Amino acid sequence: MSENVPCEYQIDDELIECNHCKNTMFIKGAAMLNTAKMTFLGLDWLNRSAVTLMCDKCGLIHWFGKAPTPKYNRS
């Protein structure tokens, strides 16, 4: 599934909904969790990353340390 296509996501079988508008459709992305020390040493690539889900309706970005999984309808 392309990460630019809105999709419903879940963590531990719980559907994720937007904190602002309660929408359940998100676009998945990623972000680096940079630290000043690692940047100073030129080791940015060693920093951890987080999964982001941007609400397809209002644009609010939600950050996750544990990767959410796409919810597939079984119809």
Image (cartoon, rainbow, N blue to C red):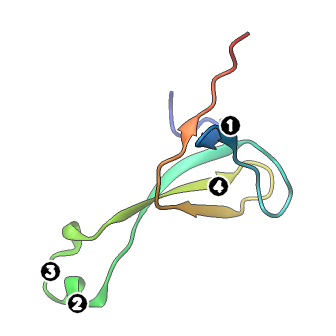
Q: Closer to us: mark 3 or mark 2?
A: 2
The location of residue 26, given as percent across then percent down, is: 67, 45
Provide residue 42's location: percent of width, then percent of height.
14, 80
User: Looking at the image, is mark 4 or mark 2 earlier in the sequence?
Assistant: 2
Tell me the amino acid under the disc marked 4: Met
Residue under label 1: 8
**Which residue: 73% across, 48% down?**
56
Where does label 3 land, which residue?
A: 42
Q: Separation of disc 4 and disc 1 at Cα?
A: 11 Å
Q: Quadrant of residue 30?
A: bottom left
Does label 3 or label 1 sit earlier along the sequence?
1
Q: Residue at x 73, y 9 (%)?
A: 75
Q: Residues within 10 Å of mark 1 (few under 14, many from 20)?
A: many
**Quarter assignment of residue 72:** top right
Mark 3 vs 2: CB contact within 8 A? no
What is the secondary structure assignment of the residue under circle 4?
A: strand
Is 48 drawn above or below residue 18 in the view shown? Answer: below
| Among the two numbered marks 3 and 2 on one chain, the one whose residue lies closer to the N terminus | 2
Q: Is residue 40 left or right of residue 49?
A: left
Q: What amino acid is labelled 3 in the image?
A: Gly
**Image mark for residue 54:** 4
Near mark 3 (Cα within 10 A), the count class, few <14, some 14-19 or many ≥20, is few
Task: Check if mark 3's residue and mark 1's residue have beta carbons within 8 Å.
Answer: no
According to the picture, the residue beneath numbered tag 2 turns out to be 37
- Find the distance from the CA under tag 3 to the CA under tag 1: 37 Å
